[in-house]
Amino acid sequence: MSNGPSVVITGASGFLGRHVVEEIRNLNHPVIAICRNNLNNPPNLQREEIASVDSSATVTEFEAFFAKIDGPVVLVHLAAHYSSLHSADDITKLVESNIHFPMRLIDALARAKPNSTVINISTLFQHFESKEYSPLSLYGATKESFLKILDFYAESESLKVADITIGDTYGANDVRRKLIDLLISHVGSKGTLKLGSGRQNMSLMHITDVARGISQVIDDHQSIPSKEVWRVQMQPTENISVRELVARIEKISGKSMCCTFDASRDRKREIYAPIEGLKKLPNYEPLIDLETGLKSLLGQ
């Protein structure tokens, strides 16, 4: 067993979380997953890897949980409630999942094990038109709100904090039904797929590369600077428009796709150009190029 930290992770049963858990195991660090209170025995986790508390715990309960862990702790926060266009029913879920729950968690960690490390995941949806902060959606706003809370814990030297911005993740066995999966499933179909203008930019990243990048930060957590949130972007494999992605899939598959593009279907706030100006994660380069990733999804 490694002499390094125990890695406490949220969102361990999600698409990204499943891959990050495997990377943590490869580092030989103990994995402890804090799961949702309605999630029983996620199939990718061993029983001993599931925390004694769940996401509904109070600060006091989380503090007692952290205090029982021997040695240092790195907290990797992946869990989030996502909504591109929120409904009234999403409000409570967005605030609880993206602000209240992680706030209870980090406050407890700061109390039980001060100077521990937190690795938070942010989104390009916080940077509309490449601005330092301009939310594309309420989801992006809640993600940035939690990041501002992390500023306090970092600047007061209660915790060391790294914030990693990632783009559009994709890969095999993704149940989220993202656009890229919809396009892949439509290859060779006789039906018509109705899309927006197709000008939207996608910052595509293979899930294996993203998990490897997070693992890199975990392994090098002692070099994370103190007194500030260390904000970095994991470089995407490729920036590509939806129209270009459709053409790329057609070329690789050798099959046509019947897609119609209608700008009236676009949302008021869309990302039409790559997000620029964010500090890059040092010593990280994606390894799986888009063509290789698409061929894998197409079963080639």
Image: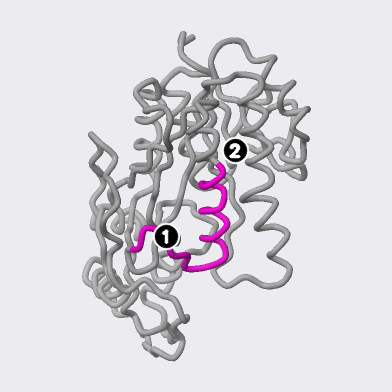
Task: Based on the picture, tell me whether residue 141 belongs to the magenta stretch.
Answer: yes
Q: Name the N-terminal-most of marks 1 and 2.
A: 2
Q: Which amino acid, mark 2?
A: Thr
Q: Which residue does the image show at 68% across and 46% down from the upper left?
A: 100
Q: Residue 105 location in percent, x, y? A: 65, 34
Q: Residue 133 got which mark?
A: 1
Examine the residues drawn in magenta and state their main secondary structure.
helix
Label 1 residue SS:
loop
Is residue 208 shown left or right of residue 45? left
Give the colour scheme of this rendering: one colour
Q: Which amino acid, mark 1?
A: Tyr
Q: Which residue does the image show at 40% across and 71% down from the upper left?
A: 183
**Disc 1 to disc 2, C-alpha distance:** 25 Å
Q: Nearer the viewer, mark 1 or mark 2?
A: 1
Q: Residue 99 location in percent, x, y? A: 63, 49
Q: Residue 202 location in percent, x, y? A: 34, 65
Q: Give the residues in magenta.
A: 131-149
